[in-house]
Image (cartoon, coloured by chain):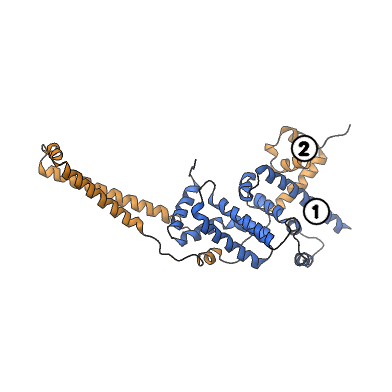
Amino acid sequence: MNHITGNNYEDKLLVDRVLNGDSHAFGLIIKRSERVVSHIVFKMIRNAEDRKDVAQDIYLKAYKKLSDFKFESRLSTWIARIAFNTCMDDLRKKKLVLNHDISDEDVTELQSCNLTEQKELAEILKEEIERLPAVSRTLISLFHNADMSYEEIGEITGMPSGTVKSYLFRARRALKNNLLAEYKKEDL
Amino acid sequence: MKIKHLSDEDIQEYALNPLECDIRISGHAGGCSECLLRVNEYRLIFDGIKEQPQPLFDFDLAELVVAQLPTEKPKTKGVWAIYVALLIFVLLAGTGIYLFRDYVLAIFSGIGTFVLYLIITTVFTILVVLSMDMYKSFQKKIHSLDVY
């Protein structure tokens, strides 16, 4: 059953307008979904220029497939799914290993950070999050920063919510262990 | 006796939602200093993650994408659809009245010509006003989405 209520009603109005040739309405769709898409793109794509290309690619794909959208989820969730898959394709194309994708350039970037004696936890945390695998840091961002549920993240990533929960547990544990190890290293 | 502490998953669950946790978890965490320490470590991390800045594109993504979309004139069938619908209604009503004019005349034979004229004019005016109101309401709903 396709039950259109609440936000889905506004989504339907916008989608109908776009399918009738109103490109301004698609601009509104982009604005409404940009927040969650930015979480995914920023966490999965390191290079700023690549992010710009990938972000555009995501929405152009969404535009082409818009007539296939059946309102079984929120429009922003559907677009986020396209974003996640597009980023995964980009990483595979560049042969970046999804579990260990820290390139030499990234290591240099991290090392060139101004390591003062007393860093803010937020700054250290940011570095440690960036060291996590692409999927793990994306899940952390979607759960903790975008306030999405396990089920919503599951819809975006195509994983069962139980798997998302497991992934997040492991990612947070790895983050904590890395942080503790880093602090101990600095104490020495 | 060796105390069985909470697993890392239980600790994380408690750090995230202490009130929605299983009583087994909340009961142990409330009284175990070692587990509470681990809970607080996670809470510190979760608070730190929340404070991370929201990622923002430093360019106008909507403008860039919209510029690449195929340029087509927006269809204005909305207005024409109403006129077409009204025309169809008038044609159908007129055809019906012509075909069944004897029956119609029989119904209205008792009513004066002037009263009949008033009835028809009133009904027609109400229909036109209702149609215009529905169209305005539709346009208002569409434009209420233009919030950016």
Mark 1 in CB contact with mark 2 (< 8 angstroms): no
> Disc 1 marks which residue?
A178
**Image quadrant in which you'd find residue A49:** bottom right
Numbered disc 1: what chain? A
Can I make out residue B115 in this image? Answer: yes
Q: Nearer the viewer, mark 1 or mark 2?
A: 1
Crowd band around label 2 with a 10 angstrom C-alpha radius: few (<14), some (14–19), many (20+): many
Q: Is residue A148 visible?
A: no
Q: Secondary structure at mark 2?
A: helix
Q: Which residue is pictured at 29% across the width and 51% down the height?
A: B85
Residue B112 in the image, given as x and y percentages of width and height: 10, 41
Label 1 CA crowd tier, 10 Å (few <14, some 14–19, many 20+) = some
Quarter placement of the N terminus of chain B: top right
Whether discs 1 and 2 lie on one chain: the answer is no
Residue at image coords 82%, 52%: A180
Q: Position of residue A176 (x, y in %)?
A: 78, 50
In the rendered structure, the answer to whether residue A102 lies left or right of residue B55 reads right
Q: What amino acid does circle 2 point to?
A: Ala
Chain coloured blue:
A
At 22% across and 49% down in the image, what residue appears? Answer: B91
Chain of the residue where label 2 is placed in the rendered structure: B
Say which of B93 and A145 sits in front.
Answer: B93
Q: Secondary structure at mark 1?
A: helix
For mark 2, what is the residue? B29
- Return the x and y of residue B43 as percentages of the image width and height: 73, 47
Residue B25 lies in what quarter of the image?
A: top right
Chain B drawing hue: orange
Residue located at (66% from left, 49% from top): A143
Q: How many numbered markers are drawn?
A: 2
Q: Is residue B114 left or right of residue A119?
A: left
